[in-house]
C-alpha cells in the first residue's frame, strides 16, 4: 500500500509497506500433534448430578476461574486438555455417584485420583461454594503432583477388571444376599 501526493514517488509523504518473506505455513500433522503446549494441566472437579464445577491450572500458573459444565461437556473439555499437555491430572471428591467418572478419565489417559470428602474452608470463613471446593481441590492436587503425598487423602477405587463375575463385584445399588454368618447375626452353637 502506498500513499502518493502529487506524483511524488519517493518523498517523505510516501508510505510503502515492506514485503514479508514467504514462509512455509504448511506443517506436518504429526509434528503439530506431538508438540504439546504445556507440561502439565491439573483439573479440580466438584461433581454434582447435573453439573460439574471445574478449575483448571496450566503448568504452574495460577488456577483459572471455575467453569460450570454438564457431564458430557466436561468429558469433551477433559479430552481437549490431552491435546494441550503432556500430562493431565485431575481429582474429585468421592460421593454418591460412584467411580464411573474416575474410570472414564483413566480410559481417556488422564491421571485421576478420587479423594476423601472434607470441608475445604481452612480459614473458617463460613463460605462453602462449588467454586471454592474446586479451587481447593486443584491447589491440593498441584501439591500432590509435585510430590507431597499428604496434600490429598486418596480413596482406594475398587477394581472392576474383565472377567469378574457379578457375584464378586455387584453393580452399584444391587441387592445382594448376605451369608448365614454375616455381621450382625450370632453364630449357632454346635450340636453334638
Image (cartoon, grey):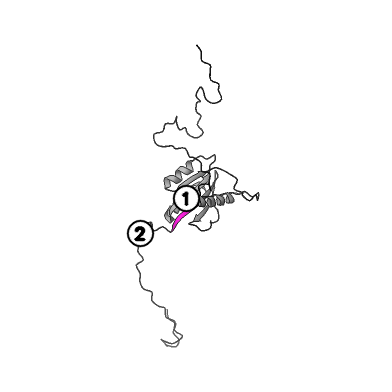
Q: CA distance from mark 1 to mark 2?
A: 24 Å
Residue 2: x percent and y percent? 42, 81
- Closest to the observer: 182 or 71? 182
Residue 103: x percent and y percent? 45, 42
Q: Name the side, left or right, on which 153 lies relative to 17.
A: right
Total residue callouts: 2
Q: Which residues are magenta?
A: 37-43
Q: Is residue 171 above or below residue 154?
A: above
Quadrant holding the N terminus = bottom left
Mark 2 Cα within 10 Å, few/some/many (few <14, many 20+)?
few
Q: Decide whether residue 40 is among the magenta residues.
A: yes
Chain-order first, disc 1 or disc 2 = 2
Residue 68: x percent and y percent? 54, 51
Mark number, residue 31 = 2
Q: Name the side, left or right, on which 87 lies relative to 94.
A: left
Residue 138: x percent and y percent? 53, 51
Q: Is residue 167 above or below residue 34?
A: above
Q: Quadrant of residue 34?
A: bottom left
Q: Decide whether residue 175 is among the magenta residues.
A: no
Mark number, residue 89 = 1
Amino acid at each position: 500500500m502506498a500513499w502518493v501526493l502529487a506524483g511524488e514517488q519517493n518523498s517523505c509523504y510516501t508510505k510503502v509497506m515492506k514485503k514479508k518473506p514467504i514462509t512455509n505455513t504448511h506443517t506436518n500433522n504429526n509434528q503439530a500433534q506431538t508438540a504439546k503446549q504445556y507440561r502439565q494441566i491439573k483439573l479440580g472437579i466438584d461433581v454434582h448430578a447435573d453439573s460439574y464445577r471445574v478449575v483448571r491450572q496450566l503448568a504452574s500458573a495460577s488456577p483459572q476461574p471455575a467453569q460450570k459444565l454438564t457431564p458430557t461437556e466436561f468429558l469433551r473439555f477433559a479430552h481437549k486438555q490431552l491435546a494441550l499437555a503432556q500430562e493431565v491430572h485431575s481429582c474429585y471428591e468421592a460421593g454418591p455417584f460412584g467411580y464411573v467418572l474416575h474410570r472414564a478419565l483413566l480410559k481417556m489417559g488422564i491421571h485421576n485420583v478420587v479423594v476423601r470428602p472434607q470441608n475445604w474452608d481452612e480459614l473458617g470463613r463460613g463460605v462453602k461454594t462449588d467454586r471454592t471446593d474446586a479451587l481447593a481441590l486443584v491447589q491440593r492436587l498441584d501439591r500432590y503432583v509435585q510430590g507431597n503425598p499428604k496434600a490429598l487423602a486418596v480413596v482406594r477405587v475398587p477394581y472392576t477388571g474383565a472377567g469378574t463375575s457379578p457375584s464378586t463385584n455387584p453393580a452399584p445399588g444391587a441387592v445382594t444376599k448376605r451369608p448365614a454368618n454375616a455381621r450382625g447375626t450370632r453364630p449357632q452353637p454346635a450340636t453334638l
